[in-house]
Amino acid sequence: MALYSRVSGFVGLITLQNPPVNALSAAVRQGIVDMVERALGDPNVKSVVICGQNGNFCGGADIKEFGTNMSGPPLVPMIDAIEAANKPVVAAIEGSALGGGLELALGCHYRIAHSKARLGLPEVTLGLLPAAGGTQRLPRLVGVPAALNLITTGRHVTATQALQLGIVDQVTDHNAVDVAVKFSLSVAGQSLDARRISTYPCPLPSDSDALFEGVMQKVRQRAHGAIAPVACVQAVRAAATLPYSKGMEREQELMATLFTSGQARAQQYCFFAQRAVGRWRMPSGARWDTSKPRPVHKAAVIGLGTMGRGITVALAQTGLSVVAVETQEKQLMEAKQAVSGMLERGAKRHGVAPTLDRISYSQNIHAVAEVDLVIEAVFEDMALKTEVFQQLSAVCKPGTLLCTNTSALDVDKLASKMPNPELVVGMHFFAPAHVMKLLEVVYGPRSSPQAVATAMQLGKKMGKVSVAVGNCRGFVGNRMLMPYLQQAFFLLEEGATPELVDRALEEFGFPMGVFRMSDLSGLDVGWRVRKRDELVEPDMASGQSARIRQGSRYSPLGDLLCEQGRFGQKTGRGWYQYDKPGSRVARSDPWLHSFLVEYRARHGLVPRSIDQQEVLERCLYALINEGFRILEDGIAAGPEDIDVIYVFGYGWPKHRGGPMFYAGMVGLAKVLERLEHYQQAHPDVPYLQPCSLLRRLVASGSPPIHRWREAIKKRQSQL
Ligand SMILES: CCCCCCCCCCCCC[C@H](O)CC(=O)SCCNC(=O)CCNC(=O)[C@H](O)C(C)(C)COP(=O)(O)OP(=O)(O)OC[C@H]1O[C@@H](n2cnc3c(N)ncnc32)[C@H](O)[C@@H]1OP(=O)(O)O
């Protein structure tokens, strides 16, 4: 709703009231319509100020309403009526003015923002476009290039940046509502003709066709198949080429297509899923709202390889004091230089001072005696990690949280060797750790709720999307990756090429297909793991029996490439070839194709034609099947946790909502039917055996994704 009061004698103050972000629900829109009418009809009112309750202007349209039968007054005529008012209307912007919130402000005659406010049109991130006049008013106000940038990226700007762009008229450090009230009186009675943005001509650059074509090309490249960014460019182009009323028609038309699209549903699901994972719970019953995190002021990182360096940077950028420990002198010197470089570049990008003095470096583990939390990032070796943890428990003050950045080792086994296993959790960062948004917080049966709460809170402070997951081989993300990679290898054996597989996955929306991705991360990483698992057999025979390991089908293709020293980009050769080691442009490699031909012949494999549909079904459904197993095992609390992990850590396209959401969109019965089909064709591949949770969900009529947790809980309570 909206509150109305008269302040300073002659100012009608309208306060949006819908905690926590004053989203424009039907009740709020009705309130604004009614209160604007009241203010304009009151002869004692000379000017109007619109603000939001609790220091927050407005977070935009109420996204929760989108899936419902929307009622109440529509936004466009409401904003048009404000703009047409004959008394000055001033938006007092505190907190955020986003989406419909900024569009409301653009309908006002003046905008005054608090210096800490943030503004933006993030609709594109929800699979939409700013459809309350945003695509038509913003380019008229700030010009086409700046509007295109803001609308197609959805990025937020600070109040100062908004002032520079011309979005707001004034920025203040004082109470924005008080300043706006005073200001509105100072302009009362003046002509408003020049203040109605919809009447402005749209300033056009000289070669606007070239501009739009260039932007469209870039946007399509970045979008990986998402339709909203493309529609945003089309809508802004309408602002540049059509009169306002026609441009508005185009905006509405484009919005109608997006609004009902599966992509918008997927992206809005991601918005709520990202928030839902913060409300974590453990199988023990411990939960986010009953577990108090410990304060962390000082942290340590042990081991300054690639991961340790990234984690050090991320901690320092969060404002923590960091002790960075590396026992090898040469490695320490290199790390110091690399960390300083990363901090300096980051600071330059954000226009702030680098935080180099927050880090102290040491070769001695005793330097961590006073820290509140340690993140160990030494080589992936259980014996080494155990030794480091034992040293840490002897050196650290009582209660220090001990976190391991392992990506694969058993966190509980590590904890079991410690005198205080309740203080041990996994913090699985993704490379580069100062850039990637995802953090898996891994708890074992002994981890205390306080330890989990502390790691989750620290992750949030570091700007990560933190997801609490149970302890198992590969946790959630890497565990699901195994069947995905395995299917990709099998497809090569059966007749596909890396190019075909990658093209299918990239057209689906992944920024990189599985083979280009393995070349980037290094083929030797998986090779080491497979060797440790005793899967690699150096002296390889031929025939089918040579491709069975531990009773299941196995493809040694990756091992054979590694034996040739083909580790991917870093060696200039992998599944593709590169101009030189370290170069990034993957080119098709005739050697690899001949190698595949020779390999298939040696093993009696008759190549067949494989289409993109099969690539997608086998790679993605095998991965999804493992996701259902993870849910069944209680390793992830719900499908949202898995989806957030895949969207933020593994490049799953957001406009497809994450693997579990995608399974729901495809239809669980269809996923099951295809898995059964492939399992019959490949009975020696356990990953293709449909998970019993998937079968049960299908048997119970394939409930919508928000009801899967009930099915899982019911099952777990029966066990
Ligand atoms: C045939 C069909 C024809 C169809 C025609 C269609 C016509 C429809 C016309 C509609 C016109 C709409 C036009 C408009 O342009 C569209 C929009 O405005 S879309 C919304 C744009 N806004 C956003 O994207 C902002 C989203 N919010 C945020 O970014 C952040 O929440 C924040 C505001 C920066 C605050 O961040 P935090 O302080 O960190 O808080 P949280 O993020 O944790 O949020 C707290 C709480 O609030 C919930 N929430 C936030 N924003 C909204 C919202 N806009 N609507 C509903 N709920 C919101 C959030 O989910 C949290 O709650 P929780 O999930 O934890 O319960």
Image (tube, rainbow, N blue to C red):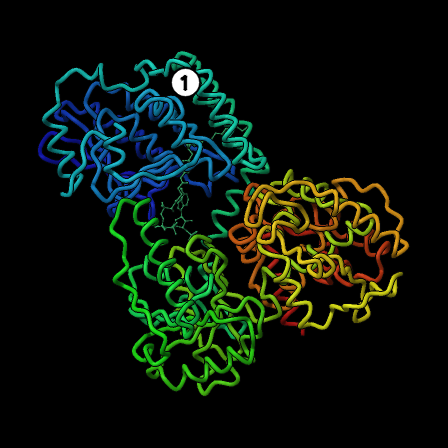
Q: Position of residue 588 (x, y in %)?
A: 69, 41
Q: Can residue 296 be seen in this view?
A: no
Q: Quadrant of the C terminus?
A: bottom right
Q: In this view, does 303 lie to the left or right of 444?
A: left
Relative to 288, does residue 39 appear above or below in the rendering?
A: above
Q: Where is residue 475 in the image (x, y as percent from the top left)?
A: 58, 66
Kind of residue sitting beneath label 1? Ala
Which residue is nearer to you in this view: 41 or 91?
91
Which residue is nearer to you in this view: 600 or 710?
600
Q: Where is residue 197 in the image (x, y as percent from the top left)?
A: 29, 20
Regarding ligand 1, which quadrant of the image does it lie in?
A: top left
Which residue is nearer to you in this view: 302 or 552?
302
Give the crowd class for mark 1: few <14, some 14-19, many >=20 residues within 10 Å: many
- Mark 1 residue element: helix
Q: In which quarter of the image is the N terminus?
A: top left
Which residue is nearer to you in this view: 197 or 621?
621
Instruction: Name the residue rendered at 12%, 25% in the picture.
Output: 44
Q: Where is residue 605 in the image (x, y as percent from the top left)?
A: 88, 52
Q: Is residue 278 left or right of residue 693?
A: left
Q: Name the residue under label 1.
A: 239
Count the numbered circles shown: 1
Q: Is mark 1 within 8 Å of ligand 1?
A: no
Instruction: Name the residue rendered at 75%, 41% in the picture.
Output: 613
Relative to 410, does residue 568 appear above or below in the rendering?
A: above
Relative to 487, does residue 88 appear above or below in the rendering?
A: above
Q: Can residue 13 be seen in this view?
A: yes
Q: In this view, does 141 lie to the left or right of 174?
A: right
Relative to 192, does residue 426 appear above or below in the rendering?
A: below
